[in-house]
Image (cartoon, rainbow, N blue to C red):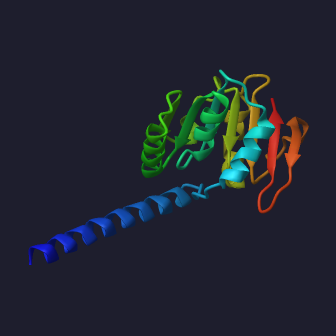
Amino acid sequence: MFIYITLLCFELIVLALVATYGVTLLFSSAMGAPYVPTSKKRINEILKEAHLKKGQTFLELGSGDGRIVRNAVKQYGVTGIGIDINPTLTFIARLYAKQEKLKNIIFKTESIFNTDLKKAHVIYLFLMPQLILKLIPSLSQLSPNTMLISHGFKIEGWDKKLYKTVKTEPFSTFYYRI
């Protein structure tokens, strides 16, 4: 009987965790940024094209589990900041960073609209076009020479700042210089 009750409790805990994770993913989608993980191969290609340098600050808006910013910190020695509105994904990102023993990285649970972008040398985003449009006033305040990488969608009205496009399926990557 004890084993049966223990297994039942374990199953209920697992079910509760899965349900909580699902609810937080729905929350992210409702806020305009569904969680869509990028493959390791694609991450390496995106970061290679960015020509990151040690000491730069790399800010990822909508960081999810932090895989882009974590790889930037690991491979290029940048200081990493991951911003996501989903506390579950931020928690998971922190766990991965701790497991990988990364020091120059922080993850914050906050709205991308409340994030200070001015200190970033490189900003990466993989957001829906309507969310990018709402973010343009904040992006317009970036320091000169800041690089902005938009994976998946071009930034409307920024054609003059676009200096490189890497076309891939299903999403191209657009590199902008302020």
Question: Residue at image x 54%, y 55%?
Answer: 31
* x and y, in percent, of residue 100 in the image: 49, 39
Establish if 69 lies above or below 131: above
Residue 27 or 146: which is nearer the viewer? 146
Position of 164 relative to 32 (above/below) = above
On screen, residue 4 versus residue 18, left or right, reads left
Res. 123 image quadrant: top right
Is any part of residue 62 visible from this angle?
no
Q: Is residue 157 left or right of residue 124?
A: right
- The residue under the point 49% across, 28% down is 103
Placement of the N terminus among the 4 image quadrants: bottom left
Please say if 19 is above or below 50. below
* Number of callouts: 0
Residue found at x 16% / y 70%: 6
| Residue 77 location (% of width, % of height) | 63, 27
Residue occupying the point 58% across, 31% down: 80
Is 97 on the left-hand or right-hand side of 42? left
- In the picture, residue 44 is in which quadrant? top right
Say if residue 28 shows up in the picture.
yes
Return the residue nearer the eye: 26 or 73. Answer: 73
125, 10: nearer the viewer: 10
Residue 170, horizontal then vertical, whole percent: 77, 62
Q: The C terminus lies in which quarter of the figure?
A: top right
The residue lying furthest to the left in this view is: 1
Where on the picture, by quarter, is residue 7? bottom left
Where residue 13 sits in the image (x, y, percent)? 27, 65
